[in-house]
Image (cartoon, rainbow, N blue to C red):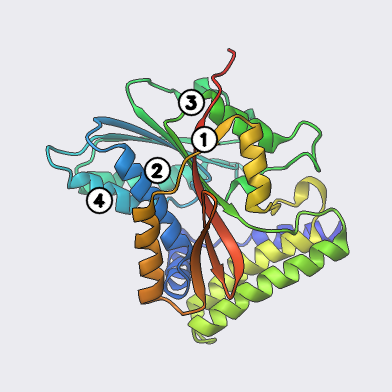
Amino acid sequence: GTGTALYTAFTSSRISAAQILKAYKAFITACPFKLLSNIFANKYIRKLIAGEPKIHIIDFGILYGFQWPCLIQGLSMRPGGPPELRITGIDLPQPGFKPAERVEETGRRLEKYCKRFKVPFVFKAIAKKWESITVEELEIQRDEVLIVNSLYRLGNIPDETVVQNSPRDAVLDLIRRIRPDMFIHGVLNGTFNTPYFVTRFREALFHYSSLFDMFEASLPREDEDRKLFEEEVFARDAMNVIACEGTERVERPETYKQWQLRCVRAGFKQLPLDQEIVKTVSNKVRSEYHKDFSVHEDGRWMLQGWKGRVFYALSCWKPTRLSAN
């Protein structure tokens, strides 16, 4: 339909990784969500891999790989030398003749970074529908500590409202079958995945107006990087939610409580929150960001919000059932 055509035209503009990085820096300056998510995930990883010689991180939704330079730098300072680091960067294929170009570019940037910090590094790029990935493609080696990381991207995978055999559940089943030592899961907490347009429009309006309000309180309106982020990220996502239907609608968030049920049903056990890590994150928000940002807990989820509205939720999981095959 018209909505899909508009969205496709909107997303086909070529913005360089350098421009997006600048815009993300503005976002991180104004808003703690992404930075704190990376701190949360990387601290869990650092604790899990302490003293281990080989590490394999499978990152579902690696995008530009902004999460990993801090971890790489930390590994380079390990007493006795850094471990061998392997990252499998997974993302959805890009339209056009080079579907894996962005993921491969991310791998090259991370490789340069590892060379600079003398961390032994191997990168594998996978750009395809996540539910079609096989265990064999991930090249699991049992002498490595295995971590699956997915921050805020599983909500882009279709669920059972789009396809009868839910690709979302298929990806969770894949993660369970590779038996990671830890699965770090970040979710966008949203209620605008309904097929009913009016309900979806209203919920999306509340969600995105809160995000714009957050920017308004934290960054000057004329800031060019703020403008770029609003146009390239917020506006694009909002247009997808409102204007697209069926498989064209890729922004399909669920609440963290819905994800809780989905993960348990898929055969995962939620791990307790590390209070030291939660305290580090809370202190950073209080000391460096606007007073209306919040970090709190609900069960075994760490929640991040603005003016009482929960935007993001993070938790760690382990598979409870072994694969039958």
Q: What SS does tag 3 mark?
A: loop
Pointer 1 residue: 126
Pointer 2 residue: 107
Query: Distance between the Cα atoms at labels 3 and 2?
Result: 24 Å
Q: Which quadrant of the figure has residue 201?
A: bottom right
> Does 83 sit left or right of 10 as displayed?
left
Q: What SS does tag 1 mark?
A: strand
**Coordinates of residue 34 in the picture (x, y in percent):** 47, 61
Question: Three-letter amino acid code at disc 1?
Answer: Ile
Image depth: mark 3 or mark 2 in front: 3
219 shown above or below 278: below
**Mark 3 or 1, nearer chain start:** 1
**Mark 4 or 1, nearer chain start:** 4
Image depth: mark 4 or mark 2 in front: 4
Q: Are marks 3 and 1 in contact (CB under 8 Å)?
A: no
Query: Distance between the Cα atoms at labels 4 and 3?
Result: 27 Å
Query: Distance between the Cα atoms at labels 4 and 2?
Result: 16 Å
Query: Distance between the Cα atoms at labels 4 and 1?
Result: 24 Å
